[in-house]
Image (tube, rainbow, N blue to C red):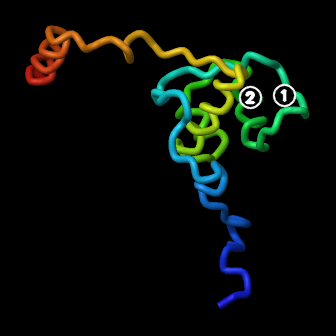
Amino acid sequence: MTPHDWLDNDAGPVVRPYAMTQGRVAPADCDFDLVAFVVATVPDLTSGQQLQPEHHAIVAAAWEPISVVELASQLDLSIGVIRVFLGDLRSAGLISLYEPPAASQPHDVDVLKAVVNGLRAL
């Protein structure tokens, strides 16, 4: 057993997601769809705000519209962690979220039936 079990030689220091979010597992104000687009509302964060480095990385990555799932992949963070941080940033007014209309509207049953029938015809 090594003196530092939390240190992985290949990956570097291992930090649990709940440690990054200070025990929070869900965003404070709302839930985020995986295909929702995130856009930063400010070009750069000021140093006076009490934000973690991951918050700064999200704002930098979201200067151009990016989906929640792409953001998690690009920053190598779990979806749960990204959602908590997005909740923080949204509460602070530092990001905007845009959900595609198809994600918020119910599915048309006729279209789904046509797709199923088309697949069966193959």
In the picture provided, is 6 more to the left or to the right than 97?
right
**24 and 52: which is toward the camera:** 24
Residue 72 placement (x, y as % from top left): 59, 39
Residue 81 placement (x, y as % from top left): 58, 44
Task: Assess disc 2: are there few (<14), some (14-19) or many (≥20) residues with their C-alpha within 10 Å of its C-alpha.
Answer: many
Residue at image position (51%, 22%) is: 36
In the picture provided, is 7 more to the left or to the right than 36?
right
Marking on residue 59 = 2
Local secondary structure at mark 1: loop
- Counting the numbered discs, the total is 2
Local secondary structure at mark 2: helix
Q: What kind of residue is marked 1? A: Leu
Identify the residue under disc 1.
45
Q: What kind of residue is marked 2? A: Val
- Placement of 122 over or under 11, stated as above or below: above
Residue at image position (25%, 14%) is: 107
Task: Assess disc 1: are there few (<14), some (14-19) or many (≥20) residues with their C-alpha within 10 Å of its C-alpha.
Answer: few
